[in-house]
Every structure is written in structure tokens, then in C-alpha cells.
Image: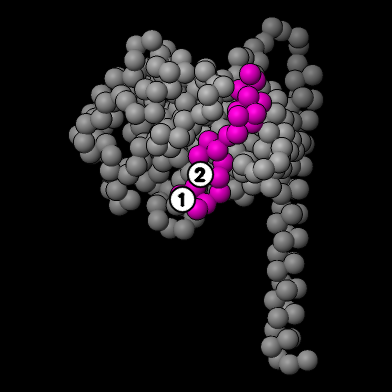
Amino acid sequence: MTIYDDVRAKLAEAEAGYQQLTADLNAAEQQIMTLTQQLEECQAAQQPETPTTPTQPQPTGTKIGCSWKGTEGLPASITKIDSYRYFFQPGDMKSAKTWGGNARTAHDKYGCRNFSVSFKPDSASANPPFAAASITNMTNYLKSIPSDVPRENVYVTFYHEHDGNIRDGSYSLDLYKKGSKQVADVAHSLGMKYGPIHNGWPMKISEWQSKEADVSLYDFWGADCYSDTYQASSPYMDVLKQYADSLKKPLLIGEMASPAESGSKQEDWCKQARTWALKNTAVAHYWSSQVGTTGTNYRLSDQAARNWFGV
């Protein structure tokens, strides 16, 4: 055995040890949540029986929606969607924006009256994330959403999937907290909801906890979560609901999807994903688009779309 073989063997052993430690940490986090819940139940059982309100919001009338980019749209068999998800790029709020684009299509063509919209900062280095003029443009944009959309049906987010940017150092937790406060204040002043949309990866509670803003600002907690190998939503996505419940916030899925292919995998996945979403979320969106021009294709086939929207 050469010295290189010895180094490679030790590297493989270290990587296996790291993977085992990661698995042990996830199992420990799940056990802690279970024990905490059991403790709360025991404490509640010892209290005098008095009328109480639920401590964790349960979905009532889950809104099943989607998003798409450009003019991709949906299969012709779909004529109604409950919710539409879209976002603005960094710096977009430096100039005035009015209602339009795919959001208008969702409203006018598909009868959508529920929207999830997120805003990114003026720039990655802006401190605070939005100048006063950008706040004014954001406020005016949200006011331009048609009046037949109930204000409480607009779910507003700052910097969706911010986790990765904080992880790689391209954005800071301090700025994320400042931007969250700015956007939450705008949303709440208009009677709209505010909450984060995290990156589901790596599906670890500790990862989300370490990258939260002030949770007292939240009216919901959200995440994006893709199933690239057609993982069943349960148990794969159950940890999202468990964490949202621990915050006592309803769960919003900003994006979820599985790849399109020639068989029935996407169709089957959409059917079970809809069942999971109806049970566990307040709002859930399927991202029916392709990543770039050559990346993963998540576009809904006709039958997959029927299964997702329950047609």
C-alpha cells in the first residue's frame, strides 16, 4: 500500500464517520422534539380542564398552487389555481413596479386570489437592505395588487432561500434580520402576512434555527423542498411541519417539485404530494418550470398537473 492509498483510506474513514455523526444529530433532534412534545402533553394533562384554543394552527382549506417562469404556463386541462408564487430580484425595488406579468395571468386566467411574493435587497451589501425609496416602491407595488384579492391572502417574504447565501458568506444574518423587519413592517401595515421561506436542504432543524430572523414577526413559516429522486413527502418532508408546529406557525411551501420523465413517476409523486400538502400545509406551490435551459425539467405533464390540482 502506497502513502496515497493510506491517505485515501483515512479520508474515506473520516467521511463515513462524518456521515454517521450527521445521521446521529438528525436522530437526536427528532428525539428532542418528540420528548418536548410528550412533556408538554404531560404538563397539559395535569392542568384543570378549562376551555382552550389550539396552540398549533391547523390548515383549514389548504390552498394548492404553483409557479412558472416566462410564458411556460400550465397544461390546458388546468383552469383554476388557488395560489401563485413569484419573486423579485435584488435591486428590483429601486424602481417603481406595478401589478402584472405571470401574477396577472394567474389572477385573470386561473381565478387565483392567493399570492406568495418575495423581495430581495437593493444589493448584497446594502445596509439597511432597502433604502426609503425602495420601501415606498415595495409598498406601492403591494397596494397595486387587485382589490378582489383579500389582503390576508398575500404572503410576503424577504430573501427566500436565504440559508444558502448566509452559509456561503454572500449575505449576512444581521442584514437578513434587518430586511425581515423592513418587509414585515410593510406587509403588516397593509394587513398582509409575513414569514420566511427557507431552503429545505439539508432538512435539519438546527440549520433553520440558526438562520431565523425575529420569529415574532412571522405569520407563517415556509420552505422550498424538491424531491429529485421522487422521495415520498412523508417522511421526507414531515420535519418541515414539525418545525413549523414548534414555532406555532402555519406551514407554507414556496416551491416543491419532482422531475418530469417518460414514465409515471412524476404523476404518482404529484398525487401523494397533494395528499401530504392538504394534511400539513396552509399553502403549497408546485414549481412547474425547467432549471435554466439544460437543467432539471420540473414541468408538469397533463396527468401530473391533474393529480396535483385534484382535477
Query: How far apart in space, not on screen, are marks 2 and 1 (Cα)?
Result: 7 Å
What residue sits 62% from the left and 43% below the top?
A: 259
Q: Main secondary structure of the magenta part?
A: loop
Q: Amino acid at mark 2?
A: Gln
The residue that appears at 54% across and 28% down in the rendered structure is 75
Disc 2 secondary structure class: loop
Q: Secondary structure at mark 1?
A: loop
Q: Nearer the viewer, residue 255 or 120?
A: 255
- Is residue 156 covered in magenta? no
Q: Is residue 67 left or right of residue 140?
A: right
Rendered location of residue 36, percent (x, y):
73, 34
Asked if residue 274 shows in the view, the reply is no
Residue 249 in the figure: left or right of residue 155? right
Q: Quadrant of residue 285?
A: top right
In screen coordinates, is 295 left or right of 182? right
Identify which residue, 91 or 82, lies in the foreground: 82
Q: Which residue is mark 1?
A: 293
Name the quadrant containing residue 261: top right
Residue pointed to by mark 2: 290
Locate residue 17, reporting x and y percent: 74, 66
Residue 107 position in % (x across, y down): 41, 18
Q: Quadrant of the N terminus?
A: bottom right
Q: On the rendered structure, is 163 left or right of 308? A: left
Q: Let me know if residue 148 appears in the view.
A: yes
Q: Report the span colored magenta.
A: 288-311
